[in-house]
Amino acid sequence: MMDPFKGFGVTFSHMFRKVITTDYPFKPPVSAPRYHGRHILNRHPDGLEKCIGCELCAWACPADAIFVEGGDNTDEERYSPGERYAKNYQINYARCIFCGLCIEACPTRSLTMSNEYELARDSRQDLIFTKEQLLAPLLEGMSKPPHAMFLGDSEKDYYVGALENPGTSAGAERAPWSDADTTDAAVKPA
């Protein structure tokens, strides 16, 4: 006899709760500072790319969403401080599961994840992000590669002081697509 009233009890208890509605397109919710979102290929403070084309991120990816083709640097055309650079770099977001294993595998911290989560596109082809779309923007004082190394004579000079001068390792708060209000001050580099 009381079973119908027990069922309606759940309905009645929800009727008097406060409704939480977000005004999404105009005021997007703030994501957590360590949220795994869109990938960023970072740069050194002089503008050279941190990616050395080692393909470890592609090997670590369980969804096979990353494609890397390495190329050799020359003295005339230098894109990264090391011997190699990523000539072709693609991430297929139709396959990516945002696990972060690619970030853990990267030896130079060239690949990081931002807080951007709006990745919906109209076609599957648009979900394949190329190197140009993934590269961090050039900031003031950076030169567009290819150019000579400005921060030292060897690639060792670039990676010894990486913790004190991260370049655009934090990435998300400096990206042109991010909103300054949605980033957390704790993740900004000093």
Image (tube, helix red, strand yellow):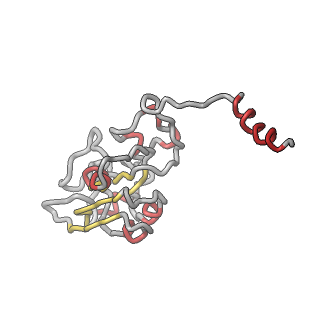
Point out residue 64 in the picture as x, y percentages from the top left corner.
38, 68
- Quarter of the rendering occupied by the C terminus: top left
In the rendered image, the residue lying farthest to the left is: 76
Q: Does 69 appear above or below 167?
A: below
| Total numbered labels placed on residues in the image | 0
Point out residue 41 in the picture as x, y percentages from the top left corner.
34, 54
Q: Does 168 appear above or below 109?
A: above
- For image coordinates 28% across by 38% down, the residue present is 140
- For image coordinates 19% across by 59% down, the residue present is 78
Point out residue 173 in the picture as x, y percentages from the top left corner.
41, 40
Q: Does 16 appear above or below 119?
A: above
Report the side of 129 relative to 39 (left or right): left
* Location of residue 67 by image quarter: bottom left
In the rendered image, the residue lying farthest to the front is: 1
Report the side of 73 relative to 121 (left or right): left
- Quarter of the rendering occupied by the N terminus: top right
Q: Nearer the viewer, residue 177 or 50?
A: 177
Q: Nearer the viewer, residue 3 or 135?
A: 3
In the rendered image, the residue lying farthest to the right is: 1
Point out residue 52 in the picture as x, y percentages from the top left corner.
30, 64
- For image coordinates 56% across by 30% down, the residue present is 21
Q: Nearer the viewer, residue 70 or 28?
A: 28
Q: Nearer the viewer, residue 95 or 133?
A: 95
* Location of residue 93 by image quarter: bottom left
Report the side of 183 relative to 147 (left or right): right
- For image coordinates 28% across by 65% down, the residue present is 82
